[in-house]
Image (cartoon, rainbow, N blue to C red):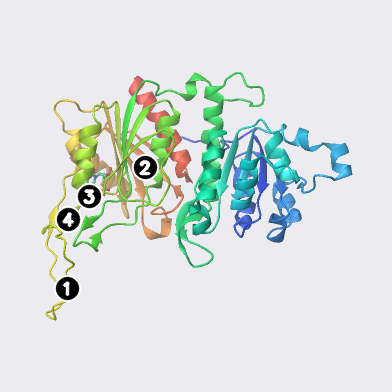
Amino acid sequence: MTETLKTETLANRRVLLVIGGGITAYKALDLIRRLRERGASVCPVLTAGAQEFVTPLAAAALAGERAHTDLFDRAEEADIGHIKLARQADAVVVAPATANLMARMAGGHAADLATTILLATTLPILIAPAMNVQMWAHPATRRNRATLEADGVRLVGPNAGKMAEAETGPGRMAEPTEIADALETMLAEAGAAAPGLGFLSGRPSTAARPLSGRRVVVTSGPTHEPIDPVRYLANRSSGRQGHAIAAAAAAAGAAVTLVSGPVSIPDPAGVTVVRVETAREMLSAVAAALPADIAVFAAAVADWRPETEAGSKKIKKDGSGPAPLTLVENPDILSTVSHLETGRPPLVVGFAAETDTVLDHARAKIARKGCDLIVANDVSVAGGVMGGTDNTVHLIHRDGTLETWPRLGKGEVARRLVTHLAGLLGR
Ligand code: CTP
């Protein structure tokens, strides 16, 4: 059974996109494309700084409508006016949100078109911070972030990784698909929380919170299995898919515990996060988080760990060649929970990360692990799933039925999965 899915998840939505003045402004152009692909119309507004990096013409060409830049543009004020601009949309997205722009927003400045719109608007605001690692860590930026969050502004990212100045750490703007996913979540939640608001069209109501009153446990990320105090065995999992599932379950009204291995992505909002390092710690944390209605095992758990417990001393080269590494098997968390005699969650979901004959392996896995559903994906290097932002998944149910979804952002996979699980639970 193959389902054809509509991917215009932002159809009829209008987004006011404020582009700030940072090197990642070029990615805002890709964001325009991604938002339009999902059916949204995009009205670009560029700060003076943004125009040092990208041109209004490029933004307009991609948006298919004029880009706005000036507060005191007579023709523009007669035509539409900045206050109208601030109202005629479903949401405002700021990408990149530079340290300067965040400071001006937090201070309530209105010295240019972008900040005037941000002060005048009553729309939900999502910002994608992007700045140097030190600027992000600075107490002033931390204060501004807290002020903005207290004002109801949502953040997506920043992610950790290599920066333009060859530094590493949090500060990289979230990827365009992550921003689009976060926007979808924000709009769904704004619609569910305030069904009377006039500025949102076609918003979901109680149907958007099908997991109200339910408990969900999600595992995510890799595990690290220490060899000694400085070395460990790990894998390439970013945690993006598991974190997105936790966020989507929370947005659907569930009380969510996310048990996460070491990742460099931010915690999802509205979720209890338990951080662990090893497979054995992950199993204990999952056991402590039960009972639950749904357990989703999206973590890439290390199958083996070094037999010898890592002591406090680093293993040294002693001239006799590499130290032998004997591995022992880790507990299988998915299988353990699936086979619980008491307290088994009614819906246990596993993932199958495969590089070949994906469906055959996944079918064998569902039988072996005893779960109700396997979400299988191809993690061969060519697909770019591991660490990437998109995913193509197949759903294999215990009764053998199969659904294949098109290539989607991990946030969209998460939302569809949560809706699917709510449906299965209700049956
Ligand atoms: N899993 C788990 N505990 C483990 C290993 C895997 O909970 N020790 C879970 C994963 O979270 C995932 C599922 O089992 O939901 C399948 O993981 P995968 O790595 O694809 O399968 P493995 O059991 O490790 O089998 P193989 O590596 O042989 O494919």
- In percent of width and height, residue 340 lies at 16, 31
Gap between marks 1 and 2 measured at Cα: 37 Å
Quarter of the figure with residue 106: top right
Residue type for callout 4: Arg
Q: Nearer the viewer, mark 3 or mark 2?
A: 3
Decide if residue 124 is in sight here.
yes
Residue type for callout 1: Lys
Verify CB contact (< 8 Å) between mark 1 and mark 3: no
- Marking on residue 242: 2
- Answer left or right for 4 relative to 360: right
Quadrant showing the N terminus: top left
Verify CB contact (< 8 Å) between mark 4 and mark 1: no
Gap between marks 3 and 4 measured at Cα: 9 Å
Verify CB contact (< 8 Å) between mark 3 and mark 4: yes
Which sits earlier in the primary sequence, circle 1 or circle 2? 2
Query: Residue drawn 18% across and 41% down?
Result: 368
The residue pinned by badge 4 equals 305
Gap between marks 2 and 4 measured at Cα: 22 Å
Query: Would you call the spot at circle 2 few (<14 residues within 10 Å), some (14-19), or many (20 or more)?
Result: many
Q: Nearer the viewer, mark 1 or mark 3?
A: 1
Which sits earlier in the primary sequence, circle 2 or circle 4? 2
